[in-house]
Image (spheres, helix red, strand yellow):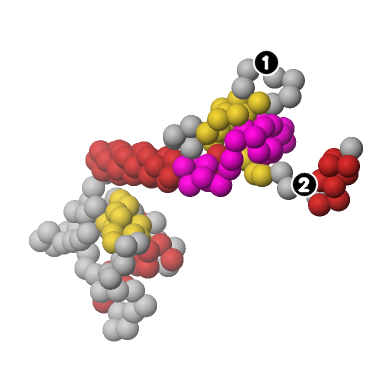
Amino acid sequence: MRSLAKAGIEAWTPLALQRKRRPRSDKFLDVTVAVLPTFVFAPERDLAELLGIVHAPVSDHPPFSVFQYGASFPTVRDSALKPLREFEAALQADWDARLEALARVAKRKRNKTAARSYIMGQRVRIDKLAYSGLSGEIKAIRSNGDLVLAIGGFVHDAIIPACDVVSIQLDGDLSKQDAAA
Protein backbone atom coordinates (compact mmCIF):
# COMPACT_ATOMS: atom_id res chain seq x y z
CA MET A 1 0.00 0.00 0.00
CA ARG A 2 2.73 2.48 0.95
CA SER A 3 4.72 1.67 -2.17
CA LEU A 4 1.70 2.19 -4.41
CA ALA A 5 0.77 5.40 -2.60
CA LYS A 6 4.30 6.74 -3.21
CA ALA A 7 3.80 5.96 -6.91
CA GLY A 8 0.66 8.15 -6.92
CA ILE A 9 -1.91 5.35 -6.80
CA GLU A 10 -4.72 5.91 -4.32
CA ALA A 11 -4.24 2.57 -2.51
CA TRP A 12 -5.92 1.80 0.82
CA THR A 13 -6.12 -1.03 3.31
CA PRO A 14 -7.49 -0.84 6.86
CA LEU A 15 -4.69 -0.29 9.36
CA ALA A 16 -4.44 -0.64 13.12
CA LEU A 17 -1.80 0.15 15.70
CA GLN A 18 -0.32 -2.54 17.92
CA ARG A 19 2.01 -2.27 20.87
CA LYS A 20 4.82 -4.80 20.70
CA ARG A 21 7.58 -5.38 23.21
CA ARG A 22 11.06 -4.80 21.87
CA PRO A 23 13.16 -7.97 21.93
CA ARG A 24 15.29 -8.34 25.06
CA SER A 25 13.90 -5.10 26.49
CA ASP A 26 11.21 -3.78 28.80
CA LYS A 27 10.36 -1.07 26.26
CA PHE A 28 7.45 -1.16 23.87
CA LEU A 29 7.14 -0.07 20.28
CA ASP A 30 3.92 1.03 18.57
CA VAL A 31 3.69 -0.41 15.06
CA THR A 32 1.13 -0.04 12.29
CA VAL A 33 -0.22 -3.34 10.98
CA ALA A 34 -2.69 -4.19 8.23
CA VAL A 35 -6.07 -5.48 9.41
CA LEU A 36 -6.43 -7.45 6.15
CA PRO A 37 -2.76 -8.15 5.41
CA THR A 38 -3.30 -9.63 1.94
CA PHE A 39 -5.71 -7.01 0.53
CA VAL A 40 -5.08 -3.51 -0.79
CA PHE A 41 -7.88 -1.61 -2.50
CA ALA A 42 -7.16 0.75 -5.40
CA PRO A 43 -9.42 2.65 -7.82
CA GLU A 44 -10.46 0.88 -10.98
CA ARG A 45 -9.02 3.77 -13.02
CA ASP A 46 -5.51 2.63 -11.89
CA LEU A 47 -6.00 -0.99 -13.06
CA ALA A 48 -3.85 -0.59 -16.19
CA GLU A 49 -1.00 0.92 -14.18
CA LEU A 50 -1.27 -1.84 -11.54
CA LEU A 51 -1.15 -4.53 -14.24
CA GLY A 52 1.88 -2.78 -15.75
CA ILE A 53 3.66 -2.92 -12.38
CA VAL A 54 2.75 -6.61 -11.89
CA HIS A 55 4.05 -7.64 -15.31
CA ALA A 56 7.17 -5.44 -15.32
CA PRO A 57 10.38 -7.48 -15.31
CA VAL A 58 11.88 -5.12 -12.70
CA SER A 59 9.85 -3.10 -10.22
CA ASP A 60 10.42 -0.74 -7.32
CA HIS A 61 7.38 -2.26 -5.59
CA PRO A 62 7.20 -5.41 -3.47
CA PRO A 63 5.67 -8.33 -5.40
CA PHE A 64 1.87 -8.36 -5.55
CA SER A 65 -0.91 -9.61 -7.78
CA VAL A 66 -4.21 -8.17 -8.96
CA PHE A 67 -7.23 -10.29 -8.01
CA GLN A 68 -8.69 -11.94 -11.10
CA TYR A 69 -11.83 -14.06 -11.42
CA GLY A 70 -11.99 -15.85 -14.74
CA ALA A 71 -11.18 -13.32 -17.44
CA SER A 72 -12.25 -10.26 -15.44
CA PHE A 73 -11.10 -8.26 -12.47
CA PRO A 74 -13.86 -7.98 -9.86
CA THR A 75 -14.56 -4.51 -8.50
CA VAL A 76 -15.79 -3.41 -5.11
CA ARG A 77 -17.92 -0.31 -4.74
CA ASP A 78 -16.56 2.36 -2.45
CA SER A 79 -19.80 2.17 -0.45
CA ALA A 80 -19.09 -1.54 0.21
CA LEU A 81 -15.82 -0.50 1.91
CA LYS A 82 -17.66 1.78 4.34
CA PRO A 83 -17.93 -0.92 7.07
CA LEU A 84 -14.18 -1.54 6.80
CA ARG A 85 -13.47 2.19 7.08
CA GLU A 86 -15.76 2.40 10.13
CA PHE A 87 -14.01 -0.63 11.67
CA GLU A 88 -10.63 1.04 11.10
CA ALA A 89 -11.94 4.25 12.72
CA ALA A 90 -13.26 2.27 15.71
CA LEU A 91 -9.87 0.55 16.12
CA GLN A 92 -8.18 3.97 16.03
CA ALA A 93 -10.60 5.33 18.63
CA ASP A 94 -9.89 2.33 20.90
CA TRP A 95 -6.16 2.85 20.42
CA ASP A 96 -6.43 6.56 21.23
CA ALA A 97 -8.38 5.72 24.41
CA ARG A 98 -5.74 3.15 25.41
CA LEU A 99 -2.91 5.65 24.84
CA GLU A 100 -4.78 8.27 26.85
CA ALA A 101 -5.17 5.80 29.74
CA LEU A 102 -1.44 4.96 29.58
CA ALA A 103 -0.62 8.68 29.61
CA ARG A 104 -2.81 9.19 32.70
CA VAL A 105 -1.05 6.34 34.51
CA ALA A 106 2.36 7.73 33.52
CA LYS A 107 1.37 11.22 34.73
CA ARG A 108 0.23 9.78 38.07
CA LYS A 109 3.59 8.03 38.47
CA ARG A 110 5.46 11.23 37.51
CA ASN A 111 3.26 13.17 39.91
CA LYS A 112 4.05 10.86 42.86
CA THR A 113 7.76 10.92 42.02
CA ALA A 114 7.75 14.71 41.69
CA ALA A 115 5.95 15.12 45.02
CA ARG A 116 8.86 13.43 46.80
CA SER A 117 11.14 16.36 45.94
CA TYR A 118 9.06 18.92 47.85
CA ILE A 119 8.73 19.63 51.55
CA MET A 120 6.05 21.32 53.64
CA GLY A 121 6.36 25.11 53.68
CA GLN A 122 8.43 25.24 50.48
CA ARG A 123 7.61 28.03 47.99
CA VAL A 124 6.76 26.86 44.47
CA ARG A 125 5.57 28.41 41.21
CA ILE A 126 2.82 26.81 39.15
CA ASP A 127 4.00 26.13 35.59
CA LYS A 128 0.82 24.74 34.02
CA LEU A 129 -2.95 24.82 34.30
CA ALA A 130 -5.14 27.86 34.91
CA TYR A 131 -2.97 29.04 37.82
CA SER A 132 0.15 29.30 35.62
CA GLY A 133 2.67 31.84 36.91
CA LEU A 134 1.25 32.07 40.43
CA SER A 135 3.35 31.04 43.38
CA GLY A 136 2.38 29.60 46.70
CA GLU A 137 3.48 27.71 49.78
CA ILE A 138 3.03 23.98 50.18
CA LYS A 139 0.59 23.28 53.02
CA ALA A 140 0.19 19.53 52.44
CA ILE A 141 1.41 16.74 50.17
CA ARG A 142 -1.26 14.21 49.29
CA SER A 143 -0.58 10.50 48.81
CA ASN A 144 -1.48 10.71 45.10
CA GLY A 145 1.26 13.31 44.55
CA ASP A 146 -0.94 16.40 44.51
CA LEU A 147 0.21 19.45 46.44
CA VAL A 148 -2.11 21.63 48.51
CA LEU A 149 -0.90 25.20 47.99
CA ALA A 150 -1.73 28.37 49.86
CA ILE A 151 -1.74 31.06 47.20
CA GLY A 152 -1.79 34.67 48.38
CA GLY A 153 -5.11 36.37 47.72
CA PHE A 154 -7.05 33.11 47.40
CA VAL A 155 -9.58 32.19 50.09
CA HIS A 156 -9.23 28.45 49.46
CA ASP A 157 -6.12 26.38 48.97
CA ALA A 158 -5.36 25.12 45.46
CA ILE A 159 -4.73 21.44 44.76
CA ILE A 160 -2.12 21.14 42.02
CA PRO A 161 -0.34 18.03 40.63
CA ALA A 162 3.29 18.06 41.76
CA CYS A 163 4.51 17.60 38.20
CA ASP A 164 2.91 20.96 37.28
CA VAL A 165 4.94 23.09 39.71
CA VAL A 166 8.56 24.16 39.97
CA SER A 167 10.50 25.07 43.06
CA ILE A 168 11.31 28.75 43.55
CA GLN A 169 15.06 29.15 44.00
CA LEU A 170 15.86 32.09 46.24
CA ASP A 171 18.97 34.00 45.28
CA GLY A 172 21.77 33.65 47.85
CA ASP A 173 22.03 37.45 48.29
CA LEU A 174 18.26 37.75 48.70
CA SER A 175 18.32 35.13 51.48
CA LYS A 176 21.06 37.04 53.30
CA GLN A 177 19.10 40.27 53.00
CA ASP A 178 15.99 38.58 54.42
CA ALA A 179 18.06 37.17 57.31
CA ALA A 180 19.59 40.57 58.03
CA ALA A 181 16.19 42.25 58.03
Is residue 121 left or right of 162 when viewed as pictured?
right
Tell me if I can see residue 41 in this picture.
Answer: no
Residue 96 in percent (x, y) is at 38, 42
Residue 14 in percent (x, y) is at 29, 50
Residue 34 placement: quadrant:
bottom left
Is residue 125 left or right of 44 when viewed as pictured?
right
- Whether 119 is among the magenta residues is yes
* Residue displayed at 60% across by 36% down: 120
Which amino acid, by three-letter code, is at mark 2? Leu
* Residue displayed at 66% across by 44% down: 167
Residue 165 in percent (x, y) is at 62, 40
* Residue displayed at 24% across by 70% down: 64
- How crowded pointer 2 is (Cα within 10 Å; few <14, some 14-19, many 20+) is rated as few
Q: Say which quadrant the C terminus sits in.
A: top right
* Residue displayed at 32% across by 83% down: 58
Q: Is residue 71 above or below residue 121?
A: below
Q: Earlier in the sequence, mark 2 or mark 1?
A: 1
Q: Is residue 151 above or below residue 124?
A: above
Q: Say which quadrant the N terminus sits in.
A: bottom left
Mark number displayed over residue 170: 2
Question: Which numbered disc, 2 or 1, marks the residue closer to the eye?
Answer: 2
Which amino acid, by three-letter code, is at mark 1? Val
- Whether 117 is among the magenta residues is yes
Q: In this picture, which residue range is highlighted in magenta?
A: 110-138
Instruction: State the SS at label 2.
Output: loop
Mark number displayed over residue 12: none
* Residue carrying label 1: 155
